[in-house]
Structure formats: structure tokens, C-alpha cells
Image (cartoon, rainbow, N blue to C red):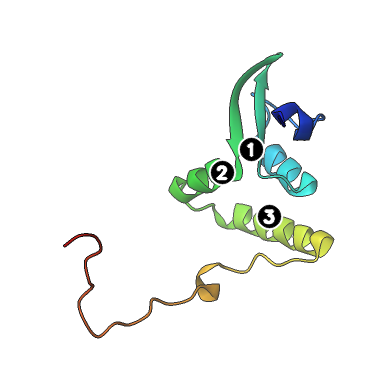
Amino acid sequence: MLRVRDIMTPSVVTFASDQTLRDAVEVLVSCRIGGAPVLDGDKVVGVLSATDIIEFESITPPPDAEREQELAAKEAAIEAELGTTTAPVTPNTTPPTPTTQPPIPLGGG
């Protein structure tokens, strides 16, 4: 029977619990990973994921103008290095499909 150890990644990227969020984001981007364990000394105290960062950023007040320029420069550097873009997600989403009748309930009704 196949075991987790048979397919796991043996060299794991980790974060120190006192590492800055900025450093962590840079590691996630440069290693092209979505998350990593957080260590306090040699003990695992949690996991930091890209979702954690997105949720945090969504409830954090917007940065001041200087910080915003700094972030824009950082994004441009990442885009140039990876050959990607950080265009807003919303313009790239499909709008809801209009309907002409009420929804039909699913199930034995």
C-alpha cells in the first residue's frame, strides 16, 4: 500500500514564527508554493498559507501612498522575474448568467 512518505517532499520550506510576513510572501513566490509550516524553535506551531495571507490582507486597512508605491514596485519586479501579471481578478471573472425563471429546487421536492 502506498504511504504518504512514499510521495512526500522531503526537503520542506519552513517559516520562523517571528519572520516578517513580507519575507514569507517572498519565499512563497520564489519557491512557487502555497504554504509552509511555521516553527517556533524546532516545534511546529502552525501553517502559513496563501489563503491566510489573502484573508489577512482583505481585512487590513489600505496602505498609505508611500507604502502603495513600494508595493507597486515590488509587484512589478515579481512580474518581470516570473513573466506574469498581477492584474485584478475581478475584470477576468465571468459575470453571472442571467436567468428568466425562478430557480428549480433540487432534491425530492
Residue displayed at 60% across by 35% down: 48
CA gap between label 2 and label 1 equals: 8 Å
Residue where numbered disc 3 is placed? 70
Confirm or deny contact between disc 2 and disc 1 (CB under 8 A). Answer: yes
Q: What is the crowding at mark 1: few (fewer than 14 residues within 10 Å), some, or many (at least 20)?
A: few
List x then y, in percent, for residue 53: 56, 43
Residue 100 vs residue 80, the one in the foreground = 100
What secondary structure is found at the residue carrying circle 2?
Answer: helix
Residue where numbered disc 1 is placed? 21
Q: Which quarter of the image is occupied by the N terminus? A: top right
List x then y, in percent, for residue 109: 16, 62
Tell which circle, 3 or 2, labels the residue nearer the N-terminal end.
2
Q: Is residue 102 above or below residue 69?
A: below
CA gap between label 3 and label 1 equals: 15 Å
Residue 7 vs residue 2, the one in the foreground = 2
Left or right position of 71 against 7: left
What secondary structure is found at the residue carrying circle 1?
Answer: helix
- The nearer-to-camera label among 3 and 2 is 2
In which quadrant of the rendered view does residue 77 lie?
A: bottom right
Residue displayed at 75% across by 41% down: 27
Residue 32 vs residue 5, the one in the foreground = 5
Residue displayed at 68% across by 29% down: 19
What secondary structure is found at the residue carrying circle 3?
Answer: helix
Residue where numbered disc 2 is placed? 53
Q: Is residue 98 above or below residue 46?
A: below
Outermost residue on the bottom side: it is 100
Q: What is the crowding at mark 2: few (fewer than 14 residues within 10 Å), some, or many (at least 20)?
A: some
Residue displayed at 21% across by 66% down: 105
Q: How many marks?
A: 3
Q: Is residue 29 above or below residue 78?
A: above
Outermost residue on the top side: it is 42
In which quadrant of the rendered view does residue 3 lie?
A: top right
